[in-house]
Image (cartoon, grey):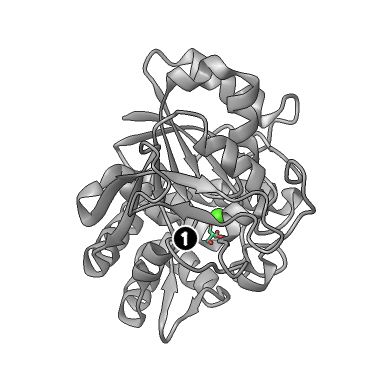
Amino acid sequence: PKPTIISTDPGIDDAVAIAVALASDQLDIQLITPLAGNVDLENTTHNTLQLLTFLGKNVPVVPGSDRPLLRPTINASVIHGKSGMKGYPFPTPTVTADHTRSAVAAMHAVINHNTTKTTVIGIGPLTDIAILLHLYPADREKIAEIVLMGGALGRGNYGVLAEFNFVSDPEAAAMVFQSGVPIKVAPLEVGLQAEVMPATSEKIKHLGKVGDMFYGLFSHYRSGSFETGLRMYDALAIAMLVEPEMFTLVDTYIAIETQGALTAGASLIDLTGRLHHAPNATVATAVDPAQFEQWLVNAIAATNK
Ligand code: BDR
Ligand code: CA
């Protein structure tokens, strides 16, 4: 299995991504670093610990940044609820967070302890990944790839042109895309194809205690709806790693806007080569919706094992 770190802001779709990542025999999740994003750091950390306790997985958790590099904090509590993971009575966490060091120091330690290259998954703002790459430039060579959910081919879901994870910390996103580390990214439009439709929600509900838990969270999730389909954005990052065949993937150059008064955080995914720049990322332009749903059902079923 690939040694892997997850930077995340749970978040209901983050919780799904974490659970299926932990259940995959292709991934060895060695560290989870929650950070401020969908909700504040205290809540994303608590949510991570609750989820791991519920799943019976004692993975190291080291809290990361409580705010973006330069800009005021934004959140997405309208989508995920005030606590970020509303809708299920989780047990009091017995898994604990390590507050003795920073998330970035912990990432650096994991990356340098591994004898093979480490995969880094980013499904929240990119603040901590950017700091890691800046503070420890030699780690760039030791990262297999950075696998992200974020950005948009076209219009945004937070700004007119900006997607939430990138607009949360545009400078951090820009630093990551300029780092030279191989990047795979699933943008917003692909998230719109990665929906849990009503029949699948019903299936998930009956997939043991984990399915029942997710059904509870889904009933409070405001990204899409039970009736029209719930968007599982962050699970795409895991799917790109473990089942890339269901995606259409294109090597391209991606720049992140940091200057625009109205467009900061927008991702310029240069599919037509207008910026005359060599590719710095592989972008998913589509996912097969039926394959995605089937994969997710199987992946959630596997979490009960
Ligand atoms: C992204 O924003 C967050 O609300 C989700 O968890 C996902 O990471 C989608 O734009
Ligand atoms: Ca997220």
Q: Quadrant of ligand 1?
A: bottom right
* Residue for badge 1: 152
How crowded is the residue under tag 1: few (<14 C-alpha within 10 Å), some, or many (20+)? many
Quadrant (top left/top right/bottom left/bottom right) for the N terminus:
top left
What x and y, as percent, mark residue 45? Answer: 68, 46
- Asked whether residue 305 appears in the rendered view, the answer is no
Disc 1 marks a residue whose amino acid type is Ala
What x and y, as percent, mark residue 235? Answer: 41, 55
Residue closest to the eye, 233 or 267: 267
Q: How many marks?
A: 1
What x and y, as percent, mark residue 87? Answer: 60, 71
Q: Is residue 153 above or below residue 118?
A: below
Q: Quadrant of residue 190?
A: bottom left
Residue 199 placement, left or right of 86: left
Identified at 48% across, 78% down, the residue is 224
Q: Is mark 1 within 8 Å of ligand 1?
A: no
Residue 223 placement, left or right of 26: right
Tell which residue pokes out farthest to the right in this image. Answer: 72
Q: Quadrant of residue 119?
A: top left
Identified at 44% across, 29% down, the residue is 181
Residue 65 placement, left or right of 221: right
- Asked whether residue 276 appears in the rendered view, the answer is yes
Residue 99 placement, left or right of 267: right
| Circle 1 SS class | loop
Identified at 73% across, 48% down, the residue is 41
Q: Is residue 219 above or below residue 139?
A: below
